[in-house]
Amino acid sequence: MTLLVESITTWSDTDVSDVAALVRLLGHEVDDAAMRARLERLTPEAGHRTWVVRGEDGRPVAVAGAQVTWAYASDEPTAQLLLLVVDDTARRLGTGSALIGTFEAWAVEQGARRLSAVSAAATDSAHRFYQKRGYHDAGVRYTKIA
């Protein structure tokens, strides 16, 4: 597989369906209509960027999404990697590394010096993936469903 990371802002029905399937690999429930609505909200104009890697058949086999945010404690933006998921067929081929490298280059272009990655996956392999790339635990995030 050729590892070409594509920034994507226009979504075909097939792309939406494939991204929804990738997000479901993380244990999230999402149908195609909800995924399209989310993707159409997460735009460059809103400070977000989404990238895909396509397989030999042209369909997305991996997706990453990020945003730039401003904090109270710093005058520089922070870039947050909010989503990174790679289909089993594209793992251990450098796909995740290509996506995270693209995220990091984009973050620097946005003026971010602090980069963070959200890893909701409770797996040691996901945590090792980030740690091998220089990311470290930086606190605990608490969540409450209202």
Image (cartoon, rainbow, N blue to C red):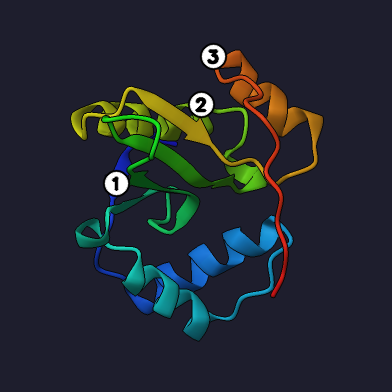
Q: Tag 3's secondary structure? A: loop
Q: Tag 1's secondary structure? A: strand
Q: In the rendered image, which residue does mark 1 sit on?
A: 6
Query: Which of the two discs, 3 and 1, sits closer to the camera?
Result: 3
Foreground residue, 51 or 71?
A: 71
Foreground residue, 71 or 37?
A: 71
Decide: few, some or many residues near mark 3? Use Cα within 10 Å; few <14, some 14-19, many ≥20. few
The Cα atoms of the two marked residues, 3 and 2, are separated by 16 Å
Tell me which residue sits at (67%, 30%) in the image. 139
Tell me which residue sits at (61%, 14%) in the image. 132
Tell me which residue sits at (27%, 53%) in the image. 47
Q: Tag 2's secondary structure? A: loop
On screen, residue 33 above or below 138: below
User: Which numbered tag is attached to residue 134?
Assistant: 3
- Give the quadrant of the C terminus: bottom right
- The amino acid pointed to by label 1 is Glu
Query: Which of the two discs, 3 and 2, sits closer to the camera?
Result: 3
Residue 90 lies, in percent from the top left, at: 57, 40
Residue 86 lies, in percent from the top left, at: 58, 44
Foreground residue, 111 or 86?
A: 111
- Give the quadrant of the N terminus: top left
Residue 121 lies, in percent from the top left, at: 73, 44
User: Which numbered tag is attached to residue 94?
Assistant: 2
- The amino acid pointed to by label 3 is Gly
On screen, residue 136 above or below 51: above
Left or right placement of residue 26 versus residue 70 in this view? right
Decide: few, some or many residues near mark 1? Use Cα within 10 Å; few <14, some 14-19, many ≥20. some
Mark 1 or mark 3, which is nearer the start of the sequence? 1
Mark 2 or mark 3, which is nearer the start of the sequence? 2
Tell me which residue sits at (30%, 32%) in the image. 107
The Cα atoms of the two marked residues, 3 and 1, are separated by 24 Å
